[in-house]
Structures are given as C-alpha cells and as structure tokens.
Image (cartoon, helix red, strand yellow):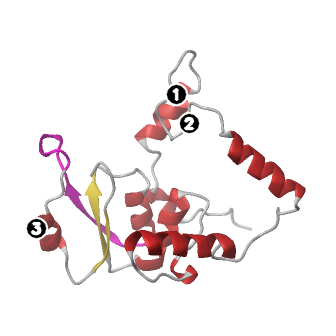
Amino acid sequence: MSPLRWNPALDALPLSGIRKMFNLASTMKDVIHLSIGQPDFPTPASIVEAHIAALREDKTHYTMDAGLPELLAALADYYGARYGRRLAPENFVETTGGSEAMYLAITAVAAPGREVIVIEPSFVLFQPLVRMTGARVKRIVTRAERGYQVDPEEVIASIGPATCAIILNSPG
C-alpha cells in the first residue's frame, strides 16, 4: 500500500509571517500579543450568562446548515431596517468566524480559469485560498502614502472576463 499523499493544493498555503511570529512569541515571556484578534478583556457577563442559559436549556445541538433560523431572521430584520431594503433570512449564512465565511465565499466562486482581484494589504488567508481553488490572484496594491485608498478606476480597469470576485478589506 502506498503512503498517503497530501493534496498538492496545500503547497499554496505557506505558513504566514504572522503565524510564524505568533508561534515564536508563544515560546517567549513578557510578550504583548497584538496578533490574531485575541481580546485583552474578559468575556462580557451578558455573553457568559447567555451561554450558561443555553447549556441549561439543552441548546447544544447542531443547527440548520445556514445557521440558527431565529438568528437569520433577526439579521434580516436588523440589516433590512438599517439599509432600507427587504431582506430574507435566506440572504444570510451563519459561520463560526470570518475565516470560515471567506473560505465559503471564495470556494463558492473561484475555480480554475477564473481570477479573483485582491486589494492589498489583505488578510494572509485570502490569496492562498484563491490559489487552492486553482483560480488566479490579481493583486491591486494600495500604499501608505495614499492612505491605503483604493483607486476605483484601477479596480474597474482590472476587471476582466475571468474575474469572479473582488476582495476588499480594511485597511486596503
């Protein structure tokens, strides 16, 4: 029996610089962590109490694929009112975080022969995810001296027949 071979697409996922620094910092003392969004304050009491209540009420089971129906309805109501549009719960998907949301969005549209425009600087996960799908990354680099402002004309000029998505993020 031949040994298991890893998916070659994993080669598109190099360890990012921030992860290297995070791993190094974990071996050091007296480090102030400014990396992966770990809050420097305790979880608010209202969130702790809501979790305790959910455990007591046996709300520990899987939800529907898109998420908890009550949450999706609340999101539709909130954002519909905020933006003055009719939105349905089906317009929303609940994820465990931003990385999962981006994974789902990118893999839903990117494929071999397609391209995704990524505004830089960007989160370290975006470009490797695009490459894993076989799609091509088209980078638009913003600069500090211009306040990381995106030039709309440059974005428009970058859109081609193979463009399937544009990833905009802050500070880019």
User: Who's the residue at 71% across and 77% down the image?
Assistant: 64
Q: Residues within 10 Å of mark 2 (few under 14, many from 20)?
A: few
* Distance from the alpha carbon under mark 3 to that under mark 2: 37 Å
Residue 153, which numbered label? Answer: 3
Disc 3 marks which amino acid?
A: Glu
Task: Give x and y (percent) for residue 12.
Answer: 43, 59
Q: Is there CB contact under 8 Å for labels 3 and 2?
A: no
Q: What range is drawn magenta here? A: 133-148
* Distance from the alpha carbon under mark 2 to that under mark 1: 19 Å
Discs 2/1, front: 2
Q: Nearer the viewer, residue 39 or 19?
A: 39
Q: Nearer the viewer, residue 126 or 14?
A: 126
Disc 2 marks which amino acid?
A: Pro
Q: Nearer the viewer, residue 2 or 157?
A: 157
Q: Nearer the viewer, residue 83 or 98?
A: 83
Label 2 vs 1, first from the N-terminus: 1
Q: Which SS class for mark 2? A: loop
Residue 39 magenta: no
